[in-house]
């Protein structure tokens, strides 16, 4: 077995808080093991455009606590094309890069898997997305920070909702996954949640809101951007037909959910994942993903991430209803 000598790291997909802490752990682990580290700019785009920079100890100083990613990130369509993957492979080869660490989501891992099958590059994936919807891991970097940002925002909205006895439809991110919405609803004491995995009984919800409005109560309804109705504005459009719009407000949280200094949990897992990825490459391993299972960090096959993600805590729906009966 030839020991990996040159490792490159990139961040891909939507940025998430903790990515910098992870980059730091990868680079510092390389420094510790006396191997070379490279950072790739703007995800797979940088690999194609040959934007790779050597990184040393000082290059990752003072970044652990910063949100976003110092390397930049992108969703790269070109990487689906074998001709561009060939260019990417040539750019790695000319620097003798034999190990690649991809911090991102399942889409990024798909490209990485194909790439490592085509070319002689060992690949380790590190889950990083606020959506926390990657199969095979209980945790993806950024989720805890995003959840904390969201519940603080919902708390603020609750203050004004209760002062005006209003009903707020608060839209959260998550793409086609309701993980953020479901967990937000439980932890912010929301009265209802709309999410892609759940078919809504709009009439039942309208009645519930009607009762709240007539009882002069405030309510918070969390709407996942990918829910089956079409987001908070569509839910609003439905409800306003019934004369409820006077008491209804829509708040779309948007990209504030993705930024900010990472929480303790994100810094911890980002650091553990980064170190684990470098150790795996040094052991000659490839096509693996760092993951959290049962609270501990493990390595699983990268292909596991390509299976559809299923929310494990759908039973929270009953809890949300149980605690908000009126
Ligand atoms: O995957 C993270 C995420 O924030 C999703 O929740 C959201 O749907 C998407 O990225 C938004 O992407 P963009 O910033 O490209 O609009």
Image: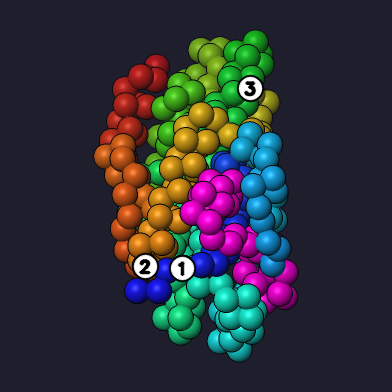
Asked if the stretch drawn in magenta spans residue 40, the answer is yes
Q: Position of residue 178 (x, y in %)?
A: 44, 45
Q: Nearer the viewer, residue 294 or 30?
A: 30
Q: Quadrant of residue 272?
A: top left
The residue at which mark 2 appears reads as 284
Q: CA distance from mark 3 to mark 1?
A: 51 Å
The reply to whether discs 3 and 1 touch (Cβ–Cβ < 8 Å) is no
Q: Secondary structure at mark 3?
A: helix
Q: Which residue is mark 3?
A: 157
Q: Residues within 10 Å of mark 2 (few under 14, many from 20)?
A: some
Which segment did they paint magenta?
Answer: 22-51
Position of residue 200 in the picture relative to residue 54 (left or right): left
Mark 3 neighbour density, 10 Å: few (under 14) some (14–19) many (20 or more): some
For the point 27% across and 39% down, which residue is it?
Answer: 294
Q: Nearer the viewer, mark 3 or mark 1?
A: 1
Q: Secondary structure at mark 1?
A: loop
Residue assigned mark 1: 4
**Which one is closest to the eye, mark 2 or mark 3?**
2
Which of these two is toward me, 307 or 23? 23
Alpha carbon distance from label 2 to label 3 = 51 Å
């Amino acid at each position: 077995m030839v020991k990996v000598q040159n490792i490159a790291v990139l961040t891909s997909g939507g940025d998430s808080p903790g990515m910098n802490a992870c980059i730091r752990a990868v680079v510092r682990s390389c420094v510790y093991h006396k191997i070379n580290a490279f950072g790739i700019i703007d995800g797979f785009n940088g690999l194609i455009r040959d934007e790779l920079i050597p990184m040393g100890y000082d290059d990752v100083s003072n970044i652990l606590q910063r949100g976003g990613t110092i390397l930049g990130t992108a969703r790269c369509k070109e990487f689906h094309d074998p001709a561009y993957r060939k260019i990417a492979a040539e750019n790695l080869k000319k620097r003798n890069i034999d190990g690649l660490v991809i911090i991102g989501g399942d889409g990024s891992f798909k490209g990485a898997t194909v790439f490592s099958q085509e070319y002689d590059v060992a690949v380790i994936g590190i889950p990083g997305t606020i959506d926390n919807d990657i199969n095979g891991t209980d945790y993806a970097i950024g989720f805890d920070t995003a959840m904390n940002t969201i519940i603080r925002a919902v708390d603020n909205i609750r203050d004004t909702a209760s002062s005006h006895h209003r009903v707020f439809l608060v839209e959260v991110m998550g793409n086609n996954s309701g993980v953020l919405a479901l967990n937000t609803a439980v932890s912010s004491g929301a009265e209802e949640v709309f999410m892609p995995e759940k078919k809504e009984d709009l009439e039942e919800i309208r009645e519930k809101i009607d009762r709240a409005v007539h009882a002069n109560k405030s309510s918070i309804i969390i709407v996942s951007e990918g829910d089956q109705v079409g987001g908070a504005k569509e839910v609003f459009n439905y409800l306003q037909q019934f004369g409820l719009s006077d008491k209804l407000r829509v708040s779309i949280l948007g990209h504030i959910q993705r930024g900010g200094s990472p929480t303790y949990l994100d810094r911890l897992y980002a650091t553990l994942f980064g170190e684990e990825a470098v150790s795996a490459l040094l052991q000659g391993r490839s096509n693996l993903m760092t993951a959290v299972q049962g609270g501990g960090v493990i390595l699983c096959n990268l292909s596991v991430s390509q299976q559809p993600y299923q929310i494990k805590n759908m039973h929270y729906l009953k809890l949300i209803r149980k605690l908000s009966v009126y």
